[in-house]
Image (cartoon, rainbow, N blue to C red):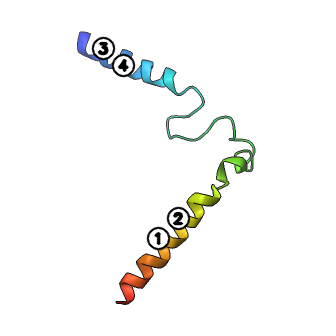
Amino acid sequence: DPDYLEKYQELHEREDLFPDYEENGTDLLGASDPHSDDLDDVIDPEIEEVYEKFCLNSEHKEKQ
C-alpha cells in the first residue's frame, strides 16, 4: 500500500531526528543513572527571580 509506505517512511525519518529518545520520550542516555541529568535542572538565577515575583504577584491578585 503506497499510503502506508509513505506514512511509515515519514515516521522513520522523524525517529532519526531524536536518536537518544525512546518512543515514550525517555532519555536513553540517562536511563541507567537517575542523576545523570541533574545539571539540566539548574535554574538561571534571573529566571528564578522573575518566577518568584510572578508567583508573589499572582498570590497578591488572588487575595484581592
Disc 2 is placed on an element classified as helix
Q: Say whether marks 4 and 3 touch (CB < 8 Å).
A: yes
Q: Residue at x 50, y 35 (%)?
A: 23
Q: Position of residue 20 (x, y in %)?
A: 60, 30
**Amino acid found under the numbered disc labelled 3:** Glu
- Residue 24 got which mark? none
**Residue at numbered disc 3:** 6
Task: Decide if residue 54 is on the left or right side of residue 63.
Answer: right
Front residue of this view, candidates 33 and 37: 37
- The residue at which mark 4 appears reads as 10
**C-alpha separation, residue under disc 4 versus residue under disc 2:** 41 Å
Disc 4/disc 1 C-alpha distance (Å): 42 Å
Q: Are marks 2 and 1 in contact (CB under 8 Å)?
A: yes
Q: Quadrant of the C terminus?
A: bottom left
User: Is residue 60 at least partly visible in the picture?
Assistant: yes
What amino acid is found at the position of numbered circle 1 in the picture?
A: Phe
Amino acid on which the number 4 mark rests in the picture: Glu
Of the numbered discs 4 and 1, the one sitting upstream in the chain is 4
Q: Are marks 4 and 2 in contact (CB under 8 Å)?
A: no
Residue at position x 48%, y 24% in the image? 15
Q: Amino acid at mark 2?
A: Val
Q: How many marks?
A: 4
Which residue is disc 2 drawn over?
A: 50
